[in-house]
Image: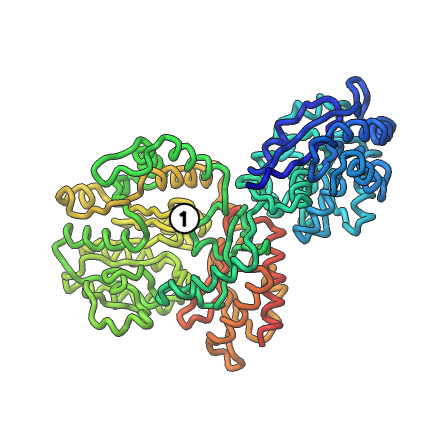
Amino acid sequence: MTRPQRIAFIWPNDGLNDDEFWAYVPPGVSWLTTRYPGTLEGHGLDRETFLASAELGPMIAAARLMRPLRPDVVALGDHAGSFIKGIGGDEAQAAALAEAAGAPHATTPATAMVAALRHLNARRIAVTSPYDREVTDAGIAFLEAHGFEVVAVERESLTDEHEIASRDAWAWRDLALKADHREAEAIALFGCGIRTAGMLPDLEMAAGKPAVPATAALVWHACSLAGMRPSKPGLGRLFAPLVPEFETQHLHHALGLHLSTGTKSFALSRTPPLFVSGAGTWLTDTQGRHYLDFACGSGTTVLGHGHPAVMRAIREQLDSGVTHLGPHFHAPVQIRLMERLASVLPSELGVFHPVTNGTEAVEAALKAAIHATGRRRFIAFAGAYHGRTLGSLALSHARGSNAVLGTLVPDTTHLPYPLTAENASHLTARLGEELARGDVAAVIAEPVQATAGMRVPAPGWLHAVRKATEKAGTLLIMDEVFTGYGRTGRLFGFEWSDEVSRTGIVPDLLVLGKAASGGIPGAILAGRRDILQGWKPGVQSSTFQMHPVSAAASLAVLEELIGHDYPARALAAGERMRAAIGAEAAHLPGFGGISGVGAMIGVAVTDPAGDPDQELTRAIRAKALGEGLITWECGTHGHVIGLVPPLTVSDGEIDRAAGILGLAFRRAR
């Protein structure tokens, strides 16, 4: 049995923030502490103090105390003291400490920060510092001497160590966000006295880039020198878990061996990236590569990966011990979710039927419509996508390889989806003729057709559909599995149903999924009381219908969307995407235009004749993936690149994604 890795931590006297380091130390490490006189109480945090604290004598004396313990690595816990003498000063400290402790390796916070930033492939850096201008400038000069470009700085000029240690992690988060700059590729947080553990995922999500505190860098680098690959959940991208190359190869082999070919896993690559961590718009794979996620888990992670509010809600529900109760009983959080949904939906949609996913929600809507009307025919639209189970597939227009299934139930008539006013006028008359037959249970429509290529209907069309269904006594089902929860610029897409008057309609049944539970399975059908409380108990049930953990996540998503007005951000993000993509790609061969609304954008790819080019689309998406951009597959001919980032996406991330997409257009031919 091997002994734990031993890291000797040489800390400057005060011990005010020992707990900060313990938070980063992974399992399997013995973290041994000794102290030396450093920045003593009453000394200011100025250049003279740090030059004095950088003297080797006291450090060496402390390090010698560790010699009998045979440490694997010595780590110095004074950031400013490690960079204050400039490049080379930190190396002299590390060499002296390693010799004194009899250790094969040593590191300092300045050395560790350089190693961490290089590990994250970051060159342009934003700096947050608790120190005055002179000390901060010395730290910046140290980074620049190692080849980094500091593009933004925010400092506090605090006066002593107690003042630094007294501030909680969220105060440093706020300061770091002030220092953020859209050109920065990472944020460096100076100072081994600051508190950062626990808030890093939130900071990285808000900033759209990795953050490297000196505390985290020191622990990470010390563990790395000891031969470990340090990883720990909830501590940002630097501590994201990695998987050895041979294991990654094994996992890819196992994936190809065991996974059904009916999935989409191999649409772009036989060896797709395997993701081990996420923060905001970013995903990290087994090899430490970082990807901008503009597919958003097929539109599910509307607040990004690892959103603190969603993670907190999930943990709290898990900690309660109530993870599932079946369809007969309920946890309080499930009822609170229904109450909150009722508060933001029209009063007519105040009754809910919980389900597991979007396609099940559509199935429930179909059955509810048949039970309520006694009719069995449905009307859907060309380009529609409502799911892959047999009932929802009957409503979906393009069935692809599923065409071999033949005639499906329920009986569905597909009408054109009007993209122009002229088409809308013709369609309204055609719809009236179909409804006049008196056998249609419901018309089902998407406010925006996502899978068909982010297609937005002609203005006023949904109003015309609503009037026609009311006249015929037919139900209107709005499928908002994709458009719901803020993505269109309103909380729900039916609120945008008339682009001219900016007024909405109220459907009879509303299908919600994908973003409805923040990245874990969960969906819900909302509807009129007479419909959803008019059928017999147990006639439509499923085991995992919006279970308590999903409900907790769903409620957290809803509160965040409303509290921070993320639907408005969807509009701003959409405008930014259109402008950035237009600047990067509109002049390139294959670019066929931009469609969509809010934060659901489609980029069409066409051949020289202007026809859809599915092969080129796939090639562009594959090139983009290779450059670190995840896109979404859509379009009636598979010829549209879908871009659906989380609503927390930053302008810098949008610009970076657009740059990658432009590069992919140029290289795909």
Q: Can residue 138 be seen in this view?
A: no
- Image quadrant assignment for residue 172: top right
Give the side of residue 475 with respect to residue 301, left or right. Answer: left
Spot occupied by residue 662 in the image (x, y as percentages of width and height): 61, 66
Q: In this view, does 518 lie above or below 275?
A: above
Dot 1 corresponds to which residue? 515
Task: Look at the numbered disc 1 and give the secondary structure of its residue.
Answer: helix
- Image quadrant assignment for residue 343: top left
Which quadrant does the C terminus fall into?
Answer: bottom right
Pick the front one: 461 or 561: 561
- Number of marks in the image? 1
Pick the front one: 666 or 312: 312
Pick the front one: 290 or 253: 253
Q: Which residue lies furthest to the front in this view?
A: 1
- Give me the residue at 57% from left, 38% from top: 28
Give the side of residue 364 with respect to residue 229, left or right. Answer: left
- Give me the residue at 71% from left, 47% from top: 115
Q: Residues within 10 Å of mark 1 (few under 14, many from 20)?
A: many
Spot occupied by residue 573 in the image (x, y as percentages of width and height): 54, 52
Pick the front one: 235 or 131: 235
Q: Can residue 510 be seen in this view?
A: yes
Q: Is residue 502 above or below residue 434?
A: above
- Give me the residue at 65% from left, 42% from top: 223
Which quadrant does the N terminus fall into?
Answer: top right
Give the side of residue 78 with respect to residue 385, left or right. Answer: right
Spot occupied by residue 5 in the image (x, y as percentages of width and height): 63, 39
Spot occupied by residue 240 in the image (x, y as percentages of width and height): 57, 46
Residue type, numbered disc 1: Ala
